[in-house]
Amino acid sequence: MANLKIKLTKSLSGRLEKHIATAKSLGLKKIGSETIQPDNPQTRGKIEKIKYMIEVTEE
């Protein structure tokens, strides 16, 4: 199964609480933090919700 590398590129401060919670559930805490997540529908849904403040690459 493929993995996705997700990097937080914008700050979490001033964002909606749901978006902050989504970023934290992906393991993103501060700008520049990266995480590797499995490529599945749950992860894709989270990415879609906060796509304006992350950068995603496939591994």
Image (cartoon, rainbow, N blue to C red):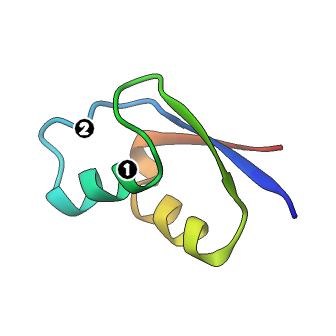
Left or right of 3: which side holds 55?
Answer: left
CB atoms of marks 1 and 2 within 8 Å: yes
First-in-chain label (1 vs 2): 2
Q: Residue at x 40, y 56 (%)?
A: 25
Residue 50 numbered tag? none
Mark 1 closeness class: few <14, some 14–19, many ≥20 residues within 10 Å: many
CA gap, disc 1 to disc 2? Answer: 8 Å
Residue occupied by mark 1: 23
Quadrant of the rendering where the C terminus is positioned: top right
Going by the numbered disc 2, the residue's amino acid type is: Leu
The answer to which quarter of the image holds residue 42 is bottom right
Front in this rendered view, residue 21 or 16: 21
Left or right of 18: which side holds 55?
Answer: right
Coordinates of residue 3 in the picture (x, y in percent): 77, 53
Residue 12 numbered tag? 2
Vertical order, 45 against 2 (above or below): below
Q: Secondary structure at mark 2?
A: loop
Q: Residue at x 12, y 40 (%)?
A: 14
Coordinates of residue 52 in the picture (x, y in percent): 41, 47
Going by the numbered disc 1, the residue's amino acid type is: Ala
Vertical order, 8 against 26 (above or below): above
